[in-house]
């Protein structure tokens, strides 16, 4: 199932590119919203709002940093400071509609 998602999104050469660059990819949920600590009075409300807002995303990580790309919009939503720019440029070539803005 996971392989189907990455194949649909990034194409057939993505796995070999990740292996060559020492990267791993996992599906995560992502949202701009924050879930409050479970002992906070607003926890239940914040959890519900997070779940309603969340998107599926791919988190691609390696020893130099990581990047998170939403599945439905192909938008880069998080990039760690150490993620190599050349890898970001290569990654853009895999996903049609990829948007790093």
Image (cartoon, rainbow, N blue to C red):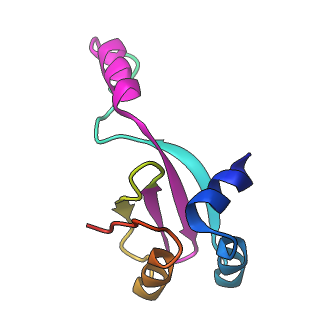
| Residue at the spot 49% in from the left edge and 68% down from the top edge | 95
Could you tell whether 69 is left or right of 42 in the image?
A: right
Quadrant hosting residue 98: bottom left
Q: Is residue 100 above or below residue 35?
A: below
Q: Which residues are magenta?
A: 41-69
Q: Indicate the position of residue 31 as horizontal and vertical percent values.
A: 35, 40
* Magenta highlight on residue 5: no
Quadrant hosting residue 83: bottom left
| Residue at the spot 36% in from the left edge and 25% down from the top edge | 52
Q: Which residue is at the front of the view, 84 or 42?
A: 84
Determine the residue located farthest toward the bottom in the rendered image. Answer: 86
| Residue at the spot 27% in from the left edge and 15% down from the top edge | 42
Q: Is residue 70 above or below residue 92?
A: above
Could you tell me how many numbered marks the image carries? Answer: 0
Could you tell whether 6 is left or right of 50 in the image?
A: right
Q: Quadrant of the N terminus?
A: top right
Quadrant hosting residue 33: top left
Q: Which residue is at the front of the view, 50 or 99?
A: 99
* Magenta highlight on residue 64: yes
Q: Quadrant of the C terminus?
A: bottom left
Could you tell whether 96 is left or right of 26 in the image?
A: left
Q: Indicate the position of residue 53 as horizontal and vertical percent values.
A: 34, 31
| Residue at the spot 40% in from the left edge and 35% down from the top edge | 54
Q: Is residue 86 above or below residue 65?
A: below
Q: Indicate the position of residue 32 as horizontal and vertical percent values.
A: 29, 42
């Amino acid at each position: 199932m996971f392989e189907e998602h990455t194949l649909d999104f990034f194409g057939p050469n993505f796995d070999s590119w990740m292996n060559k660059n020492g990267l791993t990819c996992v599906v995560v949920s992502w949202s701009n919203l924050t879930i409050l600590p479970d002992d906070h009075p607003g926890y239940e409300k914040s959890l519900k709002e997070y779940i309603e807002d969340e998107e599926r995303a791919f988190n691609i990580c390696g020893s130099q940093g990581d990047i998170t790309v939403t599945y439905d919009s192909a938008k880069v939503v998080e990039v760690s400071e150490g993620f190599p720019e050349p890898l970001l440029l290569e990654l853009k070539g895999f996903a049609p509609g990829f948007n790093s803005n």
